[in-house]
Structures are given as C-alpha cells and as structure tokens.
Image: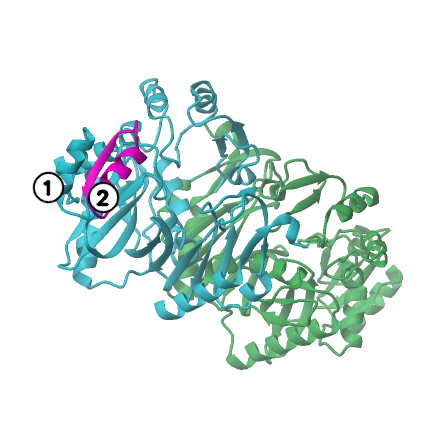
Chain colours: A cyan, B green
Amino acid sequence: MSFKVIVLDPTEGCPASKIADEQIVADFKDEAAIMRLAEKCDVLTYEIELANSSALKQLEEKSYPVRPAPETLRIIQNKHRQKSFLKEHRIAVPDFELVKSEEHLHELCRKFGLPAVLKATEDSYDGRGNFVIKSGDDVHRAYEYFKGRQVMLEKFVPFTKEVSIMVARNPSGQIESFPVVENIHKNSILDTTIAPAQISRKVEQKAIRLAKRTMEVLHGAGIFGIEMFVTKKGDVLVNEIAPRVHNSGHYTNEACSVSQFEQHLRAVLDLPLAKPELLSPAVMINILGPEGFDGVYAVTGLDAMMKVPGAELYIYGKKVSKPCRKLGHITATGRTVKEALARAKKARNAITLVPATEAR
Amino acid sequence: MSFKVIVLDPTEGCPASKIADEQIVADFKDEAAIMRLAEKCDVLTYEIELANSSALKQLEEKSYPVRPAPETLRIIQNKHRQKSFLKEHRIAVPDFELVKSEEHLHELCRKFGLPAVLKATEDSYDGRGNFVIKSGDDVHRAYEYFKGRQVMLEKFVPFTKEVSIMVARNPSGQIESFPVVENIHKNSILDTTIAPAQISRKVEQKAIRLAKRTMEVLHGAGIFGIEMFVTKKGDVLVNEIAPRVHNSGHYTNEACSVSQFEQHLRAVLDLPLAKPELLSPAVMINILGPEGFDGVYAVTGLDAMMKVPGAELYIYGKKVSKPCRKLGHITATGRTVKEALARAKKARNAITLVPATEAR
C-alpha cells in the first residue's frame, strides 16, 4: 500500500518482522524503545493490550499521533475499568463487581448466583485470567489462584451464542462494520469463527447497533473487535473489547471485500474506510500448540489439507510451540456455512504439528 | 503456509526480500550464488526469464529439484526456440522465421506482408525487444535497432483480442487453469487485464484447450502465463509463454478462490493444486513509472483512491522509478466487468507518482 512499517517486538525475527521494513527488538513496556519508534513514525498503533498505555500517553502529550488513543487502551486494559466505562455509557454488559476479599467474594457469589466467573482485571488473555466458580467449594481455590492480583466477579451469562463484530473508525469519524460472526470457544480460547453468525435478523441488527454505540463512546481510531453474548431471550450484551485486529476477524482475508488488516491501516492513517462486504460464507479454525511438548515444531499433513477445496492455511512463523499457543489458523470458504464448516474441519484435522526432530 | 523462502536478487532489500526469510544478494547469472541458494533449499524456482538456465541445468543434473525444469526455461528464453517448439508440437502460433541478414529481412517482409514484428529472440520483455515494421522504409532502421542480436520476424496477427490464461501443473501431472482474461497493451506493455475475458463461450473453450495442450507438451512444474491472440474469425494462437507468475494473473489475489502465487507454490512443491474459481469480475490496471523522471518517488492520491469501492492498491516497494517501470497496480472488483473497469480506472487516475522530494 506504499507505507513503511516498523515493528517493536521483544522477539527477534517475530512473525510481524518478516513483512515489516524494520524491527526494533525491545520489550513492549520499554519506554526508550517506544520513543525511538515514535521518532521514526508518522503514526503509531499497537496490536496487543499489554502495550504501555502510560508511555503512549506521554507520546500523545508530545503530539505524536497514537491510534487508538492511549486513553482508550487504558480503559480496555483493565477489565473492571472497561466494564465500568461501558456501564456508565449505558452499554449492556453482564453484572460485575470488584472483589475486595475472600469474604466479599463469597458474598458476591451469593448475590450473582453460581456459576459465576472470577476474572483477573489485567494482563490476562486467551482465558488465562478466567476461573469459573461452579459451587461454593470453588471459592477458596479461585481466590487463591489469583492471589495478589486485582480480580472481579462477573455474573455468568447463560448465552446461546457468542458473536463478535470488527468495527473500524477513523479520526475523521467514519465508522464501518464487518459482518456479525459467531465464535465457539474451547477452554476459554477461540476455536472456531463462523461467518456470518447463524442468528436472526433481529439479533443481528441489535448486535450491529450495540457495536456502533460502543464505537461512539470509545474514543480513538483503529479497528476494534467487539465480543458479545446473545441470550436465550435474544438480548445482546458486550463481553469484551479488543482495541486491535482480532482472531475472530481473520476470516476477512478470504471472505470480505477488504481485510481487517487493511481496514485497520486505513483507520489509523485517517484514510477513507472501505465498506466491508461478505463475499462468501467462511469458517476459521485455530491451530494451537498441541499438548505435550514445548519447542520447535514442524507442520505435517499439507498434502491432505490442500486437497480440501476453498481451504487456506496460515502458519504465523512463531518459532516455538507451547500448549494452547496460537500458531496458525485455517479459513475455508464455501457456498454455504455448512459446506465451509465441513471444509474447515476436514482441513484442520489434516494438519498436525509435531516436534521438528520428528518431521523427517 | 509454513514454508521458508530464500530469494536471490541483485538488489539489496528488493521487494521479494521484504517477505522472504532471507536474501542472497547476487546477479541472476551468478553460478556460485545459485549453488549457495541450492544448498539451502529443498526446491528451487525462478520468476524471471533472465534466470541462468545452464546453471540451473547443472543443478538438476546434480539432483537438485528445479521447477519449472531448466529445459523448459531454455526453450522459453529464446523466442525463436519457443515458437519452433510450439509449432513442432502442433500448437497454433503466428508465422515466424529467424532473420539471417538485412536482405533476408526484406525478403521475409515480402513473404509475411506488412505490418510484421521484428523481435529480439532473447533478453527482451515488456515490449523492449519488439519493433513493428509498418512499411519497407522501416526495415533498415529496425534491423539496425537490434544490431548484433539474434532476431526473428513474425507475421502480424490482426487480432481482435489478446487473452491469457494462468495454468499450473505439478510434478504429479495435475493441471489446473485459471479463467481466461483479456489484456490491453499500451506500447507493448500490459496496461489492463479484464477478468473474465469478454469473449464467446466457443472462443473461451478454444483458449482453454490450447493452454492445456501447451502445458502437456511443456515439461516442468509451476505456473505459466500463456498469452494468446484471438482473430476476427475466432481462431486462437499462442503468442508467448511466461514460465512464472504473471502480471495478467495479479487479479487472482482479489477475484479468485486461490491466488496465482499460492498455486505456484503448490505446483513447485508437488502439493495438490487448487481448482481456481472466479469469485467476482475484476479489472487490473498497472502503475508504471511516469515519463520525465528517474529516481526515488512517492505515491500521492491515496485518499481519493481509497474512496473507490472494491479497489485495492499494490505498490511493490521498488526504490526507484524509471519511465515505464512496473511499480505497482490496482485491482478493482465489481458486480459486473463494467463496474470493475470504471472503479479500476477511477482508482488508477487518483494515484500519481511524484519525485519523493515533492511529496511533502
């Protein structure tokens, strides 16, 4: 697109460095390195919630354009702050409350009813910061699990579907939404995204309105992943916001008239946003590091995978596999959601990650 | 896709190096460097006809897999050898003959009739090796123009359309074709590709059959761009073959179920080929270096370009602009060819390349 890209990442040769023009190898919190990056760039953006929002705020005060706004990141980074902010702005969210003590946690469990979800408010992702309390017996263990960290209890929403929307907004105020998609999590980690979501037109419209309203109250330009719960009654609540391209938006590469990645660039560079259209039903299934080994891996099964029509393989190029680490994904398109799902499953099942030493 | 890619290119930081894992900086003809590359790779491929076919042949003799086969490259590299080969295998081509002397050229002009095209048989591309002889007065100038190089005269085909097909073949013998597209050249350089070609079903079938037969006689795996002429009577003749991804196949990124680039990788790695489907009409227009300056350039007009729906911009990242150098392209999709064409033109007209110093 004619832009020069510099990435800051602690891992030398990280996946993004392969397609960037330059990499600054530094910790995400390294203020001096962030400043070096800022001096080389016209616009700064981030794609991890662990970014240093206070360092970014200082840059903003010195008039470096940071998008989305560091204040938006600061709100989103802390799950309690995020939910409080949404609630204040009358965006529907599940009930939640900060936990002050183990005694207080017992009280809240009685108040919300069980099951309920205990969540670390910061530095948690891919379910690593969630503990589902199913009975009174779990309370002590759950409290101990997060010992020393700020936690909140959230009422469990008996959802029938989890859906999400990627929405972009540029500094000029243009907002454009991608289609509503459906997400299936396993062990609190995204496993499958189905585009479009198999929901009624009415629920779809509710989700789109909710996502738009969320974007209106959040300041800052960029693309956002807005995850929502759909209840049995057809109510839609915001679960979580990601201020960046999102795993549930990977399907846009194959199935939309514009990808979430290009839309994000357009947004942070204050260019006109594209109006995303879904060109084909699509299903994305993640490829996670298998249980049982940590280390350099190889991909096997390409031959069988590539026999599946409409299936595309992405291996991100992370050097090391760890259990549950997101290492790649498969997106399959099809004439129907059913066909796309069957293809994605077949292609996913064909692929196995093995320790590199076993590969030949 | 989980593959590691090493490129050999004489320009440090060349466009391909940005997405490759490693670059060997060396001339395309540098045998020692080619050997270094071979030792690091499981499979070798090339995407320029200037590749060193004799060095590649030596590698093949030492059992390094080179795809397409060096012999295929050797045939294609020399336009006279290419046409002779096709003719021997009963593939329809325009009449042609090697020129032995200026006197002989006069004779051939009388034999074929004018206009006729004088072509350098080697090291020519983007029309730089073509000279159209319109009248007897041009003969001397044309002959002098190629002084010292091997030349052939080709009968001018009064074509109504130029079309092309990307066809892939893997070592296992699977052959898969992309749709027939229509090409418009300006000054012998590709300007516009229209997908699908606006031709009758009958001509389309003829073109597909001709492309398939060409693949059957050519040995070697990979993707090939087969350029053809369509005459007023509806005959189809092969004009030229490119043993690589091709400018007229760039539209496949947006408009097909698989891109020419992925299909090429599948082919050279002996993986199952995808069955390409056209998902949407599309038009590609090239962005060439403007007349009047050589040097570092900047791209302007992004704002207007990005307002055009369905238009995608590619700037390859070549550092220096020269008149007629291919620096990028725009692909636009649309519900109809007419809409795609209007969008591509509008988007292309919005973009201007200017000397970098004028950009700010």
Check the image and report above or below for B86 versus A347: below
Q: Nearer the viewer, residue A155 or B79?
A: A155
Residue B172: image location, x then y, percent? 69, 70
Label 2 crowd bin: few (<14), some (14–19), many (20+), radius 10 Å: few
Q: Which mark is residue A49?
A: none
Q: Which mark is residue A111?
A: 1
Q: Is residue B281 magenta?
A: no
User: Which element type, helix, strand or loop, lies under badge 2?
Assistant: loop
The amino acid marked with disc number 1 is: Lys
Residues at marks 2 and 1, common chain? Answer: yes
Magenta extent = A133-154
Q: Which mark is residue A137?
A: 2
Q: Image quadrant of residue B241? A: bottom right
Residue A257: image location, x then y, percent? 38, 56
Q: Is residue A207 left or right of residue B129?
A: left
Q: Is residue A144 magenta?
A: yes
Which comes before the other along the chain, label 2 or label 1? 1
Q: Image quadrant of residue B175? A: bottom right
Residue B15: image location, x then y, percent? 60, 42
Q: Residue at x 54, y 67 (%)?
A: B181
Q: Nearer the viewer, residue B8 or A206?
A: A206
CB-based contact (under 8 Å), mark 2 and mark 1: no
Q: Residue at x 68, y 45 (%)?
A: B7
